[in-house]
């Protein structure tokens, strides 16, 4: 599996470099290439907008955790009450209490599952929006600074720090969102 990823990355780089070499734009005509790379994950994690999105996710997760804890505490109280009262209850009442506890546990499990799905969906939407916004900043930065191509760092096997643009993109992204 790792070999496949390495070969696909090498192939990607080869095709990218070949397409740069075959392009008919002014860069190819003059023979001057300006290449850079950006660590998009670091941009998202380090940018003000990314930090805000992470904070909103944390707040939502905390809200849901409080609700889940209240439900779990309620279930535990019901179980404790059942244990204390079970000898005094009729068989029908015991069955009814056990069914009530089982229903509450089912509701709790469903709530936890739905909460996890909701958080994943919120995270996906936020990440999609952040990536679109950062992508626009990268394109704008590339055009403004006459870059031939800017790669995502995840696809780079090696890159000199001289062509890493992550910090510049973070600054541009933060200034754009103020």
Image (cartoon, rainbow, N blue to C red):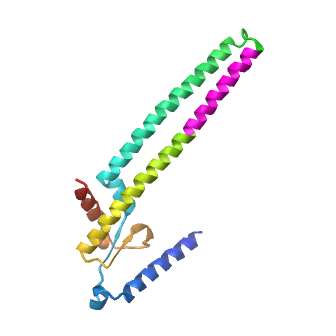
Q: Which quadrant of the view contains residue 32?
A: bottom left
- Is 98 placed above or below 51 here? above
Q: Main secondary structure of the magenta part?
A: helix
Q: Residue at x 48, y 49 (%)?
A: 121
Left or right side of 95 for 105: left
Residue 148 position, x and y percent, is 31, 79
Residue 3 shown left or right of residue 12 in the figure: right
Segment tinted magenta in the rendering: 92-112
The residue sitting at the right extreme is 91
Residue that appears at 52% across and 75% down: 8
Label count reads 0
Q: Is residue 103 magenta?
A: yes
Q: Position of residue 103 (x, y in %)?
A: 65, 28
Asked whether residue 29 is drawn in magenta, I would say no
Residue 74 position within the rendered picture, expressed as x and y whole percent measured from the top left: 56, 23
Q: Position of residue 36 (x, y in %)?
A: 32, 73
């Amino acid at each position: 599996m790792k070999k496949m990823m390495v070969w696909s990355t090498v192939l990607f780089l080869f095709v990218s470099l070949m397409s740069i070499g075959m392009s008919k734009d002014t860069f190819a005509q003059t023979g001057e290439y300006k290449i850079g790379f950006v660590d998009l994950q670091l941009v998202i994690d380090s940018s003000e907008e990314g930090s805000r999105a992470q904070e909103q996710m944390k707040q939502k997760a905390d809200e849901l955790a409080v609700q889940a804890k209240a439900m779990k505490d309620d279930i535990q109280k019901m179980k404790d009450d059942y244990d204390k009262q079970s000898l005094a209850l009729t068989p029908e009442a015991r069955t009814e209490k056990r069914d009530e506890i089982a229903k509450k546990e089912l509701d709790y499990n469903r709530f936890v599952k739905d909460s996890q799905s909701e958080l994943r969906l919120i995270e996906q939407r936020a990440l999609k929006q952040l990536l679109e916004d950062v992508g626009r900043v990268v394109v704008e930065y590339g055009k403004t600074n006459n870059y031939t191509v800017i790669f995502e760092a995840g696809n780079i096997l090696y890159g000199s720090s001289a062509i890493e643009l992550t910090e510049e993109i973070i600054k541009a992204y933060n200034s754009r969102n103020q």
